[in-house]
Amino acid sequence: MDSVNRVKTFNNDIILQFIIDRKYRVLRHLILVTLLCAAFYNSKIGYPAPASLYVKFSISLIVLGLLYVNMYWLVPKFLFKDNYMGYCLWNIILFGLAHIAGFYTRRLIASYFGQVVTPKEQSNWVAFYLVFTVLMGASAAVKLFQRWIIDSQRINELETATIQSELENLKKQINPHFLFNTLNNANVLIYKDPEKASEVLMKLSDLLRYQLYDSTRGKIFLSSDIHFLEDFLNLEKIRRDNFDFTITMEGGLQGVEVPPLLFITFIENAVKHNNDAEERSFVHVLFAFKGKELNFHCINSKPRIPVKRSVSGGLGLSNVKRRLELIYPERHELWITDNTETFNVHLTIKI
């Protein structure tokens, strides 16, 4: 709760919003460049005009370049990944490059204007390197602060989305239409095939148990989610004689964990919109895990007479897209292709 309150405070603070909001990004850079150039322009470096102006301009470019390398390469690549040794090493390298570039730039300009480096000028550069160190540290601190605020906002949004999802699951644990049809089929099978009727009720029991208990966890084994999808499709197959499905698994899926009910929306959507009274319909699902990347592929047939898509179906896809953005930011890709005869979903997740 404290983290939520802090995020609300940040959202209402104009200064903090200016620091982290992307819409102020250009203005932030303009202010940084202006302040840095003004600071160097008003500094005394031991050269008479016009050589001093060229030296100040050149050093400003060097410092700006290194600051941007620090903010957009060193900090994300090393500090965000807790690689402090690599960050320090590259800072030492950059200090060396800055010193060499500054030294030869000053010498070149001094030589062009017939100037010499004075002891006063040398002492000024010692002060410059101290200021440069402070600037590098400050820029890193700003990026880390931005990252912390963004992560806090994402966690807050994810917590809110999770609560809403749990409430939605409690409100409709399973599609009532699907539940009633399954129970009706089981009732008919009791007289025709008692063993099959028992199997239907067992699978339905597993579905309800999974949605009531396992779906409340933060993460579950992928194998459990696949078993849930298989039970769901098996019940659909019992309900529809002209329906076929396959679930293919490739790679070492053992031990892979995912958020519960992450794929059911795609499967429900595939089943809902491929019901064909005249032709056989199908749903083919593939799970493949290689390296640290999970691939999910779902393809379903489409009836000759298109099924009118409900608003809830589109809302379900929107919700799962948002859920993926919150749980796997910049670590997933989703492609949806709607062809004349098939509907394809391809999702990759970096676990």
Image: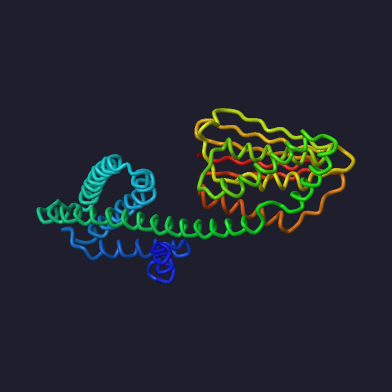
Query: 337 or 264, which lies in front?
Result: 264
Can you name the residue that lies furthest to the top here? Answer: 251
Which image quarter holds the N terminus? bottom left
Q: Is residue 28 above or below residue 63?
A: below
Relative placement, left or right, of 245 versus 348 is right
The answer to which of 258 and 32 lies nearer the viewer is 258
Q: Position of residue 251 (x, y in %)?
A: 57, 28
- Residue placed farthest to the right in the image? 278
Residue drawn at (16%, 58%), measured in percent from left and top?
A: 46
**Badge count:** 0
Residue depicted at x 61% and y 51%:
320
* Residue 313: x %, y % from top left: 71, 54
185 vs 165, left or right, is right
Q: Is residue 93 found left or right of 332 in the rendered image?
A: left
Q: Nearer the viewer, residue 200 or 230?
A: 200
Q: Residue furthest left?
A: 119
Q: x and y percent of residue 106 in the render?
A: 22, 50
Q: Residue at x 29, y 41 (%)?
A: 90
Determine whether 65 is above or below 30 in the image: above
Q: To which quarter of the image does residue 235 belong?
A: top right
Q: Position of residue 95 (x, y in %)?
A: 24, 45
